[in-house]
Image (tube, coloured by chain):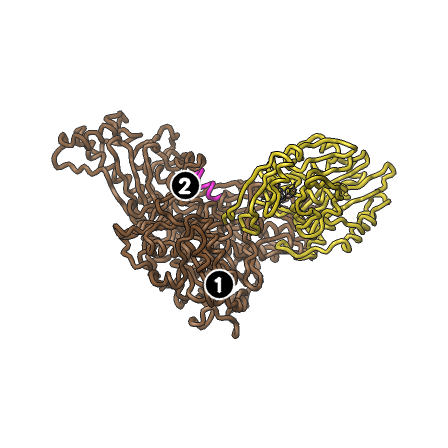
Amino acid sequence: MKWPALGYLRASSLDELWRALGDGAQILAGGQTLLATLAFRLSEPGTLVDITRIPELRGISVTGGVLRVGALTRHAELGRDALVARHAPLLTQAVPHIAHPAIRNRGTIGGSLAYADPAAELPACAVALDATLVLAREGGERRVKATDFFTGLLTTALEPGEIIAAVEFPLAGPSQRAVILEVARRSGDYAMAGLAAVLDLGADGRVTAPRLTFFGVGDGPVLATRANAALEGRALDAAAIAAAQAALDADLDPPADLHGPPAMKRHLCRVLLGRALQSLTPATEQAA
Amino acid sequence: MNEIPTPASIGLSREDLPNSYIGRSVPRPSLPKLVQGRATYTDDVVLPRMLHAAFLRSPHAHARILAIRIEAALAVPGVVRVFTGADLAKVCDPWVAVLDHLKGMKSAPQHPLPLDRATWQGEAVVAVLADTRAAAEDGVAAIEVDWDPLPAQTDMETALDAGTVVIHPELGDNLVFTRTATKGDVDAAFAAAHKVVEATFVTGRHTGVTLEPRSIIADYNRADGMLTVHQATQAPHMMQNVFAKHLRLEESQVRVICKDVGGSFGIKVHVYPDEVAVAAMARVLGRPVKFIADRFESFASDIHARDHRIKARMAVNADGTIIGFDVDDLTGIGPYSVYPRTSAMEGNQVVNLVGGPYDFAHYRCTTRVVLQNKAPTCQYRAVGHPIATAVTEGLVEMAARELGMDALDLRRRNMIRDDAYPFTSPPGMRFEGLSHHASLDKLLEMVPVARIRADQAEQRAIGVHRGLGFAAFIELTNPSPFMYGIGGARISAQDGCTVRMDPDGSVVASSGVTEQGQGTEAILAQIVAHGVGVPVERVKIITGDTLNTPYGGGTWACRGAGIGGEAALQSALALKAQILEVAGAMLQAAPESLDIVMGHITDRASGAQRMSLHELGRIVYFRGDTLPRDLPRELVQTRHFITKEYPFAFTNGIQACWAEVDTDTGMVKLLEHWVVEDCGRVVNPLLVDEQVRGGVVQGLGGALYEHCVYDERGNLLTTTMADYLVPMSAEMPDIHVGHVETPTKESLLGAKGAGEAGTAGAPGALMNAINDALAPLGARVLEQPFTPARILAALGRI
Ligand SMILES: Cc1cc2nc3c(=O)[nH]c(=O)nc-3n(C[C@H](O)[C@H](O)[C@H](O)COP(=O)(O)OP(=O)(O)OC[C@H]3O[C@@H](n4cnc5c(N)ncnc54)[C@H](O)[C@@H]3O)c2cc1C
């Protein structure tokens, strides 16, 4: 289909953006989701406001004890950035799972978080890493925890007139272990089921603060609180993994989709959980 | 027959035989144009005063149209005119897609836009013409239709039940066609058999996803009474007849031009009501009208295929001898049989092809073709073959497993002997010459079976499940009028080629077969260069224009090389003879003592160059006064070709697939794939290999990914490339291709078709590989596509 007739405006500063945002205006970042949905005429915004030239929304830095990733950071940039690899290695691992190179060259982290696709990798990583989103509006900004940001299917805590300016990730400590795994029909497809797993593994081999976050199996990233509780404080061994798998079922309420019934999603989550934790056990780490 | 010297056949290097282009991987002359974006697809054609069409499509699988309100659409800026079914019925006659030789077949009349009822979701119902496509879509959005939704018939299993929804009440029931082929005494033979294996197979409804969507521009010129249609089509002459017949014109008033086509796979050989609507609207308005299907429209209105449920049994003796097959095929084809080839062919092919590679005595196969409220199905690459092959080869491997026999030994025991030809199969197919045993031998030279089996055992020990599967197949190519012509369809099985030499010694050939991106023009150029004796760069090819090419059938059922190629060869040889006669007169030599080599007249005995074609052309065209008065000097020749002895030139082959199943996730990883096929003379090895590889990929796509999913109310759920999964390169294995060459004796060229072999065998080979991997776990899958959910369910994991 062809897009409806619409206006296009490019903002080159936040001030210009605030002036442009108004009735019927919608932000255009990488366009990798928005432009496709426009062609389906799912929405008919009056004007697209292109934010990709706004310098305030760019850049990756470590400031104030957090890793700050500007909303306009392209997936490809995220994947090759040294600061990201050092302080939030889960993100570096996640990028190759997102779509294909052409899409990664354009799609942005801000767009991915704002769109909040339940099967997308970056929203799950943000929750798993306990990130904080910096939301800006005319005359101010506020910070919202990723866990509170995703409010339902394709919905977020963004208010009208508000944008994502940046995402702040806590710096990974030496004991952090992180892994992302997913099952997708073809490479680059959205996952049928995925898991972003972050935990601390102490010198005593015990797990603290596990944040197993599943994607593609709910209406947003699913933080598996019961499975996390089953792991907390335990040595990462077969018994602990089995306990987490057993607890997981109660964390999930997956919908059926074209790939299969809820039972399949539950099963895949158990498999992913087993594989992810297995890869983090001291034995596996030593072998590798 | 087949006495064309090729370097291999006379033991020379190709440098020693410079003219010989047959059997050489000559690069395709059209490639630079395609990769540089300089091709001319239908959408690239822009005509003055052109309008753009968009269609309002039915949101319901089955609904009565109570009222259509178009006023708001007419008020949309840029909208010029709106047409309903009733408007078009005034200028366009409906069609009924049946063929006389398919006994008892019935279907309902179909109009370009339906008059009072929509019968599938996505059916075009109202057309809006505007200055741009976007404005036309705005117009569509402004149309209001009052629908009265009706119950939909979506499950083919219940299509013939009493009390079911009869989609066209005037037909009495939903049965379009049924046929049973029998041979021997199946009941007695099965009762006496050592073992009977039995299974129900399902092949998933899928479609051929072309890079270029369906595209058409129709332009009716009132000044000269000509309807000129630019169309992405496989069969320009067939379309010429269709437009003329239904728009009440003479065939000579219709010209169909088909320049570059971005893939067709059978999708573009059918008559689509929205495309006929475009021609009808152009006829009314006297203005060009363009319609380019978007991807959503493609999924909802291109033909689908392969929606079959097959219950099948095979009986064997204790020594592995196949006694017979007993098969019940059921297929749902949507609400109409598709014009003019009909939607009964696929089921009919299943009946013709099950058991194809084997010599056995007892056969019974029934197909029942029923209506549904889903998109119409029709012929898609390898029509019926992948279904028949998966059923046959699935049963063969099951029987081998039950008998504790190696499946390849079982095949070898039952394959028709290579010296048994001519041979007539139980359903009555006549084979001129096949090479099952030689092909299997060749395959085993390529597939390291022992190493694979060792690896399989090693991997199993560590919980990795790999499987090796095979599938032998036959393929129907080079069709005669027995396919469509005898049924009353004006679809040419004959094809022609006109070859001429211009004054500069270059050669132009125009052919009735068409280029869809598969390289037809490349092989025609090779054949003509070979036949005349000129460098291939000196040959230009014209295809895809009913006003400028000999009448022909176009691209379907694998016939470009076998039929079009032979016409090209014969006309090229005729031109060569004509040139040599003129050269003989000029050089005062007997024509038989001369030859043409790389654009020069040479002395046949010594090889010495006597004269360039350029010089010959100069004299013939500009100094004809110097030639003997009665010398024939037409440097242009036309020949037509049609197969005569056999209704079809069958080919054969065998494939092997090596795959790994992740039994925790149900994911299948393709490790390696092998194909040996026998398409007779290989004209261009590179093109044939890539046809085979592309075909394999499409076959694997249908077996693993591609699926047009409908819910029980007839809503199509897979309408984007994110939901309808096409195979992509990252998941595809290396595909090794080998050849055995058994040229057909019906032609000098000896070529048969090669375009469908890959698709015919790949799904069966993959199914057998998966089931080989799953066998020790007591699981098997028979329902395509083999999705993770189905594999996990078979394993009892979900
Ligand atoms: C074929 C294909 C496959 C894909 N596969 C995957 C995949 O496997 N995994 C995955 O995660 N993603 C996938 N994507 C989506 C891709 O990652 C997108 O780039 C991303 O989801 C959106 O980012 P964008 O910058 O393109 O946003 P846009 O498309 O420009 O915008 C998306 C939405 O976010 C809003 N928005 C954008 N930026 C901001 C901001 N800073 N503040 C507030 N609102 C904003 C827009 O208004 C719009 O509503 C795929 C896309 C395609 C086309």
Query: Left or right: B583 with respect to B155?
Result: left
> Dividing the image into 4 quarters, which one contains the N terminus of chain B?
top left
Residue nearest the observer in this picture, B205 or A92: A92
Reading the image, the residue beneath label 2 is B519
Residue B223 in magenta stretch: no
Q: Is residue B53 above or below residue B180?
A: above
Mostly what secondary structure, the magenta segment?
A: helix
- Please tell me whether mark 2 sits on a helix, a strand or a loop: loop
Report the disc number at residue B145. 1
Point out residue B609 in the picture as x, y percentages from the top left corner.
Answer: 26, 25
Crowdedness of circle 2 by 10 Å Cα count: few (<14), some, many (20+)?
many
Q: Residue B509: which quarter of the image? A: top left
Q: Could you tell me which chain the residue with mark 2 belongs to?
A: B
| Some atom of ligand 1 lies within 8 Å of the CB belonging to the residue at label 1 | no
Q: Could you tell me which chain the residue with mark 1 belongs to?
A: B
Q: Amino acid at mark 1?
A: Val
Label 2 to label 1, Cα distance in Å? Answer: 45 Å
Give the colour in which the image draws chain B.
Answer: brown
Q: Amino acid at mark 2?
A: Gly
- Please tell me whether mark 1 sits on a helix, a strand or a loop: strand
| Residue ranking furthest to the left | B629
Point out residue B148 in the picture as x, y percentages from the top left corner.
Answer: 51, 68
Give the colour in which the image draws chain A.
Answer: yellow
Point out residue B456 in the picture as x, y percentages from the top left corner.
Answer: 65, 45
Q: Are marks 2 and 1 on the same chain?
A: yes
Query: Left or right: B69 with respect to B229?
Result: right
First in sequence, mark 2 or 1: give its number. Answer: 1
Residue nearest the observer in this picture, A42 or A267: A42
How many numbered badges does the structure rendering display? 2
Residue nearest the observer in this picture, A193 or B610: A193
The stretch in magenta equals: B685-692
